[in-house]
Amino acid sequence: MSGDSTIEDIREQKKQQLQNETDDDSASASADGVGPAEPVYVNGTDELTSTIDEYDVVLVDFYADWCGPCQMLEPVVESIAETTDAAVAKVDVDANQQLAAQFGVQGVPTMVLFADGDPVKQMVGFEDEGTLRSLIEQHS
């Protein structure tokens, strides 16, 4: 049982470290109105709301580590984050089941595009990069 506790402690420390790095990146990126160049991992409703409020266009990727299509989508969302003005938020559905339920996520990957704080499009399953770029451009 103590081994489980240690693993959880390490996970929490790593999560906090990644969050601190993400906060630093987000602060510098949002100052010029451009989303961060890397996906932002959010944990919970407050973090997601903050991210949606901070950027004009946000693509939220609801994913699971065990999901094959989610893994195929990973380089696509990284490219979107790096090369567009949109912010990309990633939500682990296993760690954030209530948040996933709040958005009606029943399958992964599910992506929700927000523009000016409002959800404008929800997509379930793998989407190609061209489709996602086109949607982001329509709402930028």
Image (tube, helix red, strand yellow):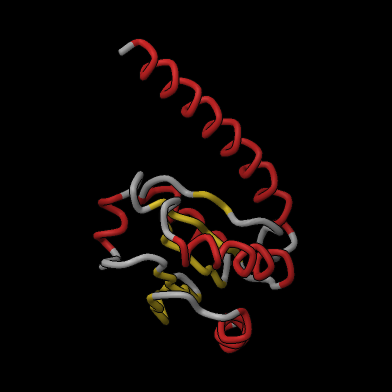
Label total for image: 0
Q: Residue at x 39, y 14 (%)?
A: 3
The image shows residue 112, relative to residue 66, as above or below, that is below
Residue 37 figure quarter: bottom right
Residue at the spot 43% in from the left edge and 54% down from the top edge? 91
Which one is in front, 130 or 126?
126
Which residue occupies the extreme front position in the image?
A: 68
36 or 2, which lies in front?
Answer: 2
The quarter of the rendered structure image containing the N terminus is top left
- Percent across and percent down for residue 42 are 47, 49
In the rendered structure, the answer to whether residue 95 lies left or right of residue 33 reads: left
> Residue extending furthest top?
2
Look at the picture and state if 19 lies above or below 31. above
Rendered position, 3 above or below 65: above
Is the C terminus in the top left, top right, bottom left or bottom right quadrant?
A: bottom right
Location of residue 2 in the rendering, given as x and y in whole percent from the top left corner: 35, 10
Rendered location of residue 105, percent (x, y): 29, 66
Q: Position of residue 45 (x, y in %)?
A: 36, 51
Going 53% across and 25% down the picture, which residue do you hit?
13
> Quick check: 120 left or right of 74?
left
At 60% across and 37% down in the image, what residue appears?
Answer: 18
Q: Is 96 displayed left or right of 69 in the figure?
A: left
